[in-house]
Image: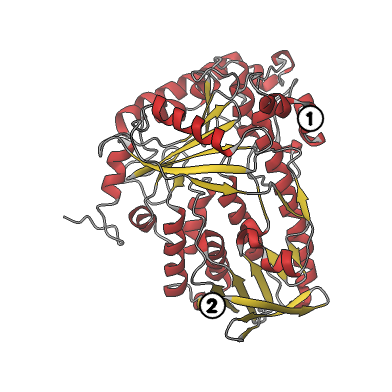
Amino acid sequence: MQQAPLSILILGGGAAGWLTAAVIAAEHGRAQGGQCEIALVESPDIPTIGVGEGTWPSMRETLRRIGLSEHRLFNECEASFKQGSLFSAWRTADPKDSYYHPFSLPHGYFEQDLAYFASENYAYAVTPQAAISDMYLAPKQLATPEYAGVLNYGYHFDAVKFGILLRDHCTRTLGVHHISSRIASIEGNGGRVTALVSESEERLTADLFVDCSGSAAMIIGDFLKVPWIDRSDVLFNDRALAVQIPHPSPDAPIASVTRSTARSNGWIWDIGLPSRRGMGYVYSSQFISASEVEADFRQFLTSSGAVDTNVQLNFRELQFAPGYRSAMWQGNCVAVGMAAGFIEPLEASALALIEQGAGLIRDFLPANSGQMTIAEKRFNKQMLAHWESIIDFLKLHYVLSQRTDSEYWLAHRREESSTDSLLENLTIWRHRAPAKQDFPQALPLFPPASYRFVLHGMGYACDLARAPRKDRDKVRSKILLDEVQKQLASYRLGLPENRVLLRQLTSRNRTGVQTS
């Protein structure tokens, strides 16, 4: 049965609004042969936060599905490759105590768990990606097709420029109607929205409204009064101090991982883009003041050689409440992005949750307004499971720490600050590896392998004597581990430096033709 016409109005632009518009329009928009009229209204004078610069590898498939060329991303968004995350000083306060959470699965992952015969440095043993990242190499070659790579990857990019690129793609290619107007009020009754009213008193109506208004949450929060679930009892961080700094030279190597360095009262992110580094200090206001954070941040930047002592730094303070809505879809309104919730920017979860929300709207979009309740029920069930699972995964980084140098870390390590589901899994994982049956979703954002990398990196002991029979095959394990080293030798010779490949990619025009 053909889907009936459905009008969709998205409130708010930026990465959340325009990515949601693109994902829905690419599948259901009239310009693509679908039945939906899709519009986005945004205020012309509300700045985009633009801090979230890291993505999960899922962004490659998202770009492919919406028809947005990788060449445009690299040319217009200051994009670079992300092959995972490097965590330093999370287990102990020693900056040299570090581990990788790479994006590539362990070699032979679906055949055998190599943890039982891998060396202590797990990530280096089971995938070449950790060593490749150490060498500042890219995950692909120039001739490799778009979205493909010999190693799994996501992106780092300028989030503001990404939103602008998406807006152009949505309006020029996907047929999304762009309305530049400030919303003055919202009309509705019975838990449903009937119209958004602009300052010029224009009534904007739709069958489905998508709230991408950020932390203002104008529809889902202010109008529909959907309760907020505060998770500051698990994840304490509620502030960040962000800054942009230049590379020391035009030829300085660009890291293809997000570097995350723990401090006594928080952690610092470091993201390399072609022209600059985006850095930020994430912390909890209950343990340290903003002035103390700035002093510690400055000390880190100078002592690490990131900046000279006399460089002028323009810090930007960000505040957020860790938590999410008790329902992201209510009646004929669904919230995506910060309107739905926000937690600290660890492991690139913010943009990944936008992708998840937009993708589920696309997949659950009702054939007519009468099926809205079914879509609402299914969407909320899956998104709430995603939020709870992600909170567990982020908490894993803290609860396994051995740091005792501050009350911040001692509080994070206490069992009462963890969720029951995480504590149950940690009990099970003392005797076997994380497995898909440990997670409620069929396709969790962070697969069991991600938990494996963090558990090993944080030194969480597992009783290897209880390994399944197939994983105790020493001969087969040695073959697989040797294959990793052979892959590394090949990739070391064949992969270009990250900066070199980025320069090659940005010397091409939008059609991929080399320019002089």
Q: Residue 246 is drawn in which quadrant? A: top left
Q: Is 2 above or below relative to 61?
A: below
Mark 1 is on which residue type?
Leu
Residues marked 2 and 1 touching at CB (< 8 Å) = no
Name the residue nearer the viewer: 269 or 172.
269
Q: Can you identify the residue that label 2 sits on?
A: 181
Mark 2 neighbour density, 10 Å: few (under 14) some (14–19) many (20 or more): some
The outermost residue toward the left is: 516
303 with respect to 438 (left or right): left
Q: Is residue 424 visible?
A: no
Q: Residue 328 is drawn in which quadrant? A: bottom right
Q: Is 412 above or below relative to 506?
A: above
Q: Can you identify the residue that label 1 sits on?
A: 423
Q: Is residue 287 visible?
A: yes
> How are the colours assigned in the image?
secondary structure
Residue at coordinates 43% horizontally, 61% vertically from top-left? 68
The numbered dot on residue 161 is none
Residue at coordinates 41% horizontally, 24% vertically from top-left? 303
150 with respect to 226 (left or right): left
The picture places residue 300, in percent across and down from the top left corner, at: 46, 28
